[in-house]
Structures are given as structure tokens and as C-alpha cells.
């Protein structure tokens, strides 16, 4: 029986490993969708109520008559119409962006191991790098910005940026990110650690 | 994540409709067709800045047809029902109350283990791993089979990669073996604490509050 369990587990591990499941997290978008659904629900209920009331022989409510009247009399080049259309366009574009963009940019994906997929917070990586740098000599001030593709470190002090970069690169490798970000260490005076192409242009 | 897909489809559909209407009105209102030299086909709506947004003629186009009002009422009813169903579906908990344990050699027995018991076992198992400051594990619904969702806070200088391996080889494998589940995939969210802050960091208050809340 234990062999059976082991088999099952190996299966799961093989699946996860084979799929290379180092995908980004995708935000569930619950709050935005709930807002949109509530708005749609309120609109549709009000409209349905009024349409049925009108069909039953009662006069339309004032808000509907007013909206219909405005839409029928205002022309397309009316300022209010243009502003409204602009707002609607922006809102629509934003909702589309929410629907398409993965979101959860705070988390970076780690290399999966077996059936466990893991993500780490970007600030957590910053903490690890800062703690590693705290043990080094000659650093007066260190600023670490962890982006999703690039980690920028600027340091003030007599420490050699190349040596600091070696240490931080080692620490970054220890984290085990699925897609390791580039590391860019430079002294605040403009002295960059050699290697990266874009750091040389600012070196002088 | 079935629910996330529904959410995104809803957002995308509403967003596309709003964007389309807004762009059409802007194109017509700013008279961009004429300025750019485009000649939209005859049925294209909202081409001239002098026309009303919804003219009486276009409003009355279908109103007299016999299918119009049943269609409008039916469409609105479907919309109301769909949105109400979706909102009610949000109230359903994402957590599970229990998990079914397969018992292949005993027929007629249906064995269920409380999700809380499994979560607590995994939490204790994770919390004793090296460099773990605090751990929380939840069993959540997912398409197909349940998933584990863990949130772990590491002590300063902790090793995230090692934590993932320890978790996989330790608590997760133990749970799989003792329950004989075919699979129980896990997602871990790892935070790392910082040793005594060397200097004040500029961070937004919102983020700081989120960080102090564990699990």
C-alpha cells in the first residue's frame, strides 16, 4: 500500500515538473467583479421594473423619461456628451485591463518543486538582500528596489560595487526564483559594477 | 480557478461594451471620421456630430415590432438572474469543511477527514520547519481536486528555496501518505522578515499594514 501511495505521489510530482508550472499568479478580481455585478444588477432591476410598469399601463418614471429625452435632444458634439463618452471610454479600458492583466505584481514565482508551487513577496527579496548587505563592510547607505525584472541597488560608501554585486547575486540565486531578475548594483557617485551594458553608459 | 475566469469574463465583457460605446461617441462627436478622411459604411452609427446620441427614429425602429418588448424584458430578466446568481455564488466559502479519503480495499465505506484537522496538522508540520516564523495552511476548492494554500513567514535571512523543498518533502508528503490521496497540490506564499531595520525605509502605510498581518 505504501508503494501505491509513493506511486501516486511520484505521478503528481511528475505532472507538476513536466508542465513547468512556474506561472505567474493571477488575481481573482473578486472586488472589481462584485462592484460591476452590483452596478449591473441595480441598473437592470430598475430598468426591468420600469419597463414592466410601462407595459402594465402606468407612466414611465421620471428618471427614465429624462434620460431618454436627454439622449434624444443632445447632439454628439455637446460638451456633456463628449465628457461622458470620455469617462465611459476610460472606464471601459480600465475594466478591460483588469480583465486581461494578471495582477498580483507583489509576488514573484519560485521554481516549483514537486507538487508545491511557491511565490515570494518582492519586499521579502529586498529584505534578504538588505540583510546580506548589512554584513558587508564599507556600506554607509544602501537602497534596494526590487522590480519584477530588475533589482536596482545603489550604495553609498567605500565598498566596491563589484564585490557587493557578487554577494547580492549569490543571495539572489539562493532565493531560487523561476525567472531571476537582473541585478544592477551601482555606487551613488556613478561608479557601477562592471558587466551590465546599461550601467557603463552612466559610469562617466 | 473557475470563479476567477467568470470574474474576468464579466469584467472584460462590460469593459468592452463601455469602451466600444465611448469610442463610437467620441469618434462621431469630435468628427474624427471627416478629419481623418475615413468613410464609414452607411449602417455605421454615430457618424455626424450634429446627430443626437439616440435619435427618436433609431429609438422607434424596433419598438413597434411584436418581438421587441418580450426580448427586452427577457434579456433584462436573464441579466438580473445572472448577476444575482453570481453575487450569491460569492457568498459560498472558498474553504472546504472536509476532504474525502479514498478507501480502495474496503467497500461501502466513505471516509472523510475534517479539513480543519488536516490544516492544523500541516500548519504544525510547517511551523517546525527551519527558519519558519509563522505558517498558516488552508484547504481550498479548486477545479478537479482540493488544493492547499499556505502562507509562510520566514525569519530574517531565511532560505525560501529550502523552505519549499522542506515543505514538499515534509508536511505535504506526510499528508499525502497518511491520507493516501492521489494528489494534493500546494501553493505557498512566502514572506521574509527583515532583521533590525538599518534605516527607515520609505514604504506606503498600506503595505506596512498588510505585512504585519500574517496568514
Image: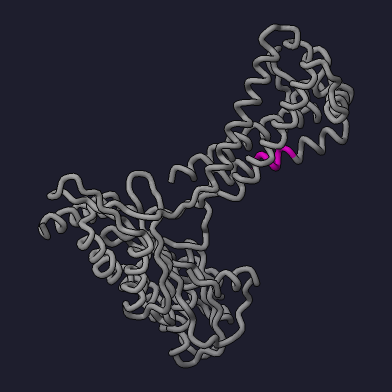
Q: In the image, is residue A98 above or below residue A7?
A: above
Q: Residue extending furthest front?
A: B108
Q: Nearer the viewer, residue B178 or B27?
A: B178
Q: In the image, is residue B72 above or below residue A200?
A: above
Q: In the image, is residue A162 above or below residue B164?
A: below
Tell whether A200 sits left or right of A49.
Answer: left
Q: Is residue B94 visible?
A: yes
Question: Magenta region's main secondary structure?
Answer: helix
Residue range corresponding to the magenta coloring: A88-93
Q: Is residue A179 visible?
A: no
Q: Nearer the viewer, residue B161 or B113?
A: B113
Q: Residue at x 33, y 62 (%)?
A: A111
Tell whether B132 sits left or right of B69.
Answer: left
Q: Position of residue A122 (x, y in %)?
A: 49, 68
Q: Position of residue B74 (x, y in %)?
A: 63, 20
Task: Check if residue A182 falls in the magenta segment.
Answer: no
Q: In the image, is residue B184 above or below residue A81?
A: below
Tell whether A54 sits left or right of B70.
Answer: right
Q: Quadrant of the C terminus of chain A?
A: bottom right
Q: Residue at x 86, y 35 (%)?
A: A80
Q: Position of residue A63 (x, y in %)?
A: 85, 30
Q: Residue at x 24, y 68 (%)?
A: B169
Amino acid at each position: 500500500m505504501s508503494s501505491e501511495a509513493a506511486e501516486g505521489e511520484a505521478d503528481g510530482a511528475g505532472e507538476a515538473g513536466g508542465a513547468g508550472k512556474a506561472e505567474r499568479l493571477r488575481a481573482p478580481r473578486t472586488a472589481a467583479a462584485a462592484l460591476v455585478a452590483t452596478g449591473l444588477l441595480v441598473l437592470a432591476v430598475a430598468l426591468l421594473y420600469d419597463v414592466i410598469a410601462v407595459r402594465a399601463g402606468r407612466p414611465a418614471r421620471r428618471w427614465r423619461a429624462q434620460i431618454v429625452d436627454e439622449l434624444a435632444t443632445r447632439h454628439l458634439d455637446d460638451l456633456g456628451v463628449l465628457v461622458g463618452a470620455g469617462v465611459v471610454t476610460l472606464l471601459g479600458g480600465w475594466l478591460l485591463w483588469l480583465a486581461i492583466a494578471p495582477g498580483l505584481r507583489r509576488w514573484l514565482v519560485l521554481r516549483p518543486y514537486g507538487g508545491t508551487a511557491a511565490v515570494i513577496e518582492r519586499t521579502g527579496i529586498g529584505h534578504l538582500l538588505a540583510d546580506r548587505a548589512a554584513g558587508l563592510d564599507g556600506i554607509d547607505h544602501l537602497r534596494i528596489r526590487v522590480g519584477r525584472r530588475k533589482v536596482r541597488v545603489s550604495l553609498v560608501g567605500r565598498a566596491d560595487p563589484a564585490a557587493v554585486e557578487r554577494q547580492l547575486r549569490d543571495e539572489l540565486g539562493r532565493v531560487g526564483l523561476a525567472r531571476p531578475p537582473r541585478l544592477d548594483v551601482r555606487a551613488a557617485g556613478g561608479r557601477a559594477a562592471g558587466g551590465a551594458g546599461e550601467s557603463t553608459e552612466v559610469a562617466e | 480557478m473557475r470563479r476567477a475566469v467568470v470574474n474576468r469574463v464579466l469584467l472584460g465583457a462590460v469593459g468592452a461594451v463601455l469602451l466600444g460605446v465611448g469610442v463610437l461617441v467620441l469618434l462621431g462627436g469630435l468628427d474624427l471620421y471627416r478629419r481623418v478622411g475615413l468613410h464609414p459604411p452607411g449602417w455605421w452609427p454615430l457618424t455626424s456630430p450634429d446627430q443626437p446620441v439616440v435619435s427618436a427614429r433609431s429609438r422607434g425602429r424596433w419598438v413597434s415590432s411584436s418581438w421587441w418588448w418580450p426580448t427586452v424584458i427577457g434579456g433584462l430578466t436573464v441579466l438580473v438572474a445572472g448577476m444575482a446568481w453570481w453575487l450569491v455564488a460569492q457568498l459560498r466559502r472558498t474553504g472546504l469543511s472536509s476532504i474525502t479519503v479514498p478507501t480502495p480495499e474496503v467497500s461501502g465505506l466513505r471516509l472523510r477527514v475534517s479539513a480543519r484537522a488536516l490544516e492544523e496538522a500541516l500548519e504544525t508540520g510547517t511551523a517546525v520547519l527551519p527558519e519558519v516564523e509563522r505558517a498558516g495552511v488552508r484547504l481550498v476548492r479548486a477545479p478537479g481536486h482540493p488544493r492547499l494554500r499556505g502562507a509562510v513567514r520566514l525569519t530574517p535571512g531565511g532560505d525560501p528555496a529550502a523552505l519549499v523543498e522542506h515543505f514538499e518533502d515534509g508536511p505535504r508528503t506526510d499528508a499525502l501518505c497518511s491520507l493516501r490521496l492521489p494528489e494534493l497540490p500546494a501553493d505557498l506564499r512566502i514572506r521574509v522578515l527583515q532583521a533590525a531595520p538599518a534605516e527607515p525605509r520609505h514604504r506606503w502605510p498600506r503595505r506596512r499594514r498588510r505585512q504585519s498581518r500574517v496568514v
